[in-house]
Amino acid sequence: MAEFPFLEVNEAIRLYGGEDLNACMQCGLCASVCPWREVESPFFARQMIRMGQLGLEGYESDEVLFGCTTCDKCVINCPREVDIIGIMRAMRSMVSEAGIRPETLKAASGSCHANGNPWSGKREDRLAWTKGIEVPKYGPDTEYLLFVCCTSCYDQRSQNIARSLVKLLDAAGVSYGIIGQEESCCGESIRKSGDEELFNKLATSNIELFAREGVKKIITTSPHCLKTFTSEYPELGGDYEVVHSSQLLAHLVSEGKLKLKGKDGRKVAFHDPCYLGRHSNVFSEPRELLDAAGAEVVPMAREEKFSLCCGGGGGRVWMETPQEQRFSVLRVQEAAQAGAEVLATSCPYCISLLEDSRKTEGLEDSLEVLEVSELLARDLA
């Protein structure tokens, strides 16, 4: 931080993208809804913003500056509509250039530089999820590019999400295809964790690839990719018609193109992912799909725009969070209290964290965690 002393820090944060820094009036409504207030934590967005306004240091630690999950609850609760996430991102970008960055995030960035993904997987293994199934290649006459997020490409648990979606798209007769090894991470979490230069590299690589392949429409398996393609790629010249898998599947069911037996019959609670719900305003489609599958949708204490973050956004999916600070623990407990037999969601990050907490909380025999596509694939007519 020596490069940005005192009040120069204020200007630097604004130059790094935190233009709204001085618009914050310190009302504290952001703190009142922050998920970190559910547990013991040193993270306080209001305090960090005030320190930035005054040009003070002391917020650069992993637990403080890199605590924000970018869940968006603070933003939608702010009476002045301050872009708090933009300020957090700017602060992270500033200190990252000074070499202050959690080691696990450095590793994720290094993997993206070397192999185009944050999971330390080889680029040639990006299609490992397709083993044993036939997935069409994207071509000149293909309607949709199926962009499978890095988590579902490399994480063994999440690979079944992509495989289940392929089964559903085939059943509905959708024209889709994948490009393959040339694809790179969308860069969403990389940017939110403060590596702006790497985000631009990844995004530019994908935009150039999509241009060569003639991509116009994209299906995403991750809401993080959805948000990035719709809100951030256009700034770099990448304009596409983008849908999350749950949106497309709901449309296919309503059109009668995707036929389900409607015999699931279990009590299912739905966890709204931050980037599908608050960030992208997609709330009804996943629930419509659960209804169509014959599930009994049971409400949880916090739903839709009030949903509790799983804890994986903002790059924190790669950081180690103490058991007593994991929001995902609170979430699986809420599902169990609601009497759910299944906790469904529509985000690979959420799946990873909820699965882990289901196990640590001893709920393996009473609560199943499923992505909506997985549940539907079991109910195909």
Image: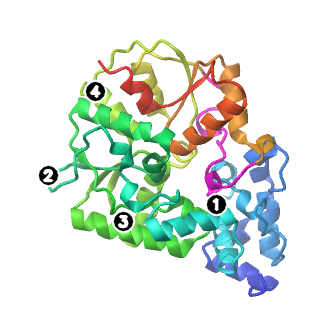
The answer to whether any part of residue 151 appears in the image is yes
Q: Which residue is mark 1?
A: 85
Residue 258: mark in rendering: 4
Q: Is residue 319 magenta?
A: yes
Name the spot of residue 368 as percent of width and height, x first.
57, 24
Q: Secondary structure at mark 3?
A: helix
In the image, what residue type sits under mark 2?
A: Asp
Distance from Cα at disc 4 to Cα at disc 1: 38 Å
- Marker disc for residue 141: 2
Chief SS of the magenta region? loop
Q: Which residues are magenta?
A: 299-321
Q: Residues within 10 Å of mark 1 (few under 14, many from 20)?
A: many
> Residue 310 at what x, y percent from top left?
64, 42
Is residue 380 left or right of 362 when viewed as pictured? left
> Which quadrant would residue 318 be assigned to in this image?
bottom right
Q: Is residue 154 left or right of residue 51?
A: left
Give residue 40's position: percent from left, percent from top.
Answer: 85, 46
Is 61 magenta? The answer is: no
